[in-house]
Image: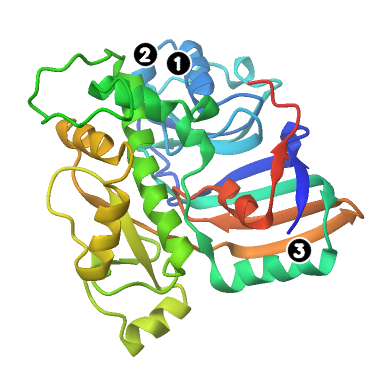
Amino acid sequence: MLSAAFRSQPEDFQVVEIDSFAAHGEGEHLLLTLRKRGLNTSEVARRLAQWAGIGEVGIGYAGLKDRHAVTTQRFSVHLPRRVSPALAALAGDPLEIVDSAWHNRKLPRGALAGNRFTLVLRQVQGERSAIEARLQAIADRGLPNWFGEQRFGRGGGNVNQALAMFGYASPSQEPAPPCADVPKRRVRREQRSILLSAARSELFNRVLAARVADGSWERGLEGEVWMLAGSRSVFGPEPCSDTLARRLATFDIHPTGPQWGQGELRAQGVCAALELRVLSEADGPALRAGLEAAGLKQERRALRQQAFDLRWTWLDGQTLELGFALAPGSYATALLHELGPVREANRSA
């Protein structure tokens, strides 16, 4: 559809968290809304801990944000004596204080209503009318809810690292029972969480790819499990009746795919058969066994996401600005994936 360069500079990827609650106004946690450039969330958390003279466990944030961007997000800092160090000592390029307020508890992961994005694509090649028609289709129909490449590490290597952590030297190995005595690569707790997420996300993306190929990612299958929009609440399996079709058309519900773990697969019938077939190919059994052995539980994730308030503006003949909002846990790069090959420019890390 188009080809373009992306992230030529951090300002080409701007993200603003959409808050899910207002500050309480009192308490021993200082809520800071910070705008950062060229820093990831973990780096800011370390700076905040040093500034406050506390351990990093006292820093809270709702979601992880990329280094190669300009992002605005909330952090909480635990200050039990309610004495805040000088904010001036914290502010300064590349960190700007947007707002501060007291709150009565630590900011937990996932405590946001979504994210609003402004993306700039440069050196755009393609027919303008076709590009705009594709954008309108995304606005009308939604788009596949892929996990983004950042979930998989540099060169996608997190999945192979997860296999090594599970005790599989190569994808060709037969999976061993979870209790088997197999050599496993030892990793730090933080790295373990990253690798488990990568393995789980890889399996979900494989199922989503199969659903995109057969066109069922936006309409559901026999034996489908459905998710209510704006929540993690699921129901079904339930066939797609006229009532469900109307709810599907208005983005009230979405078909789902598996977040693998222990327990019985919730999908049934045709839907379950597709999921089990896809996840029995290549290294799928090894990844499934590793996730089960790690104690993760079966969950579901929406196969479709809505791009809220999608708009676009041509800044010049080859520069396109996109603005939209996504629900928590959805990736802006999934939208770019639907437009065509978009290469990252001048990304050093």
Asked whether disc 1 touches disc 2, contact meaning CB atoms under 8 Å apart, the reply is: yes
Q: Is residue 44 at all visible to an observer of this figure?
A: yes
* Res. 128 image quadrant: bottom right
Sooner in the amino-acid sequence: mark 1 or mark 3: 1
Quick one: label 3, few (<14), some, or many (20+) residues within 10 Å? some
What secondary structure is marked by label 1? helix
x%, y% of residue 347?
70, 26
Q: CA distance from mark 1 to mark 3?
A: 45 Å
Vertical order, 14 against 195 (above or below): below
* Res. 237 image quadrant: bottom left
x%, y% of residue 24?
40, 44
What secondary structure is marked by label 2? loop
The residue shown at (39%, 80%) is 247
Q: Which residue is mark 1?
A: 49
Q: Which residue is mark 2?
A: 55
**321 or 293: nearer the viewer:** 293
Q: Is residue 64 at all visible to an observer of this figure?
A: no
Figure quadrant of the N terminus: bottom right
Q: Which residue is mark 3?
A: 131
Q: Residue furthest bottom?
A: 242
Figure quadrant of the C terminus: top right
x%, y% of residue 223?
23, 71
Please name which of the two marks, 2 or 3, marks the residue nearer to the observer.
Answer: 3
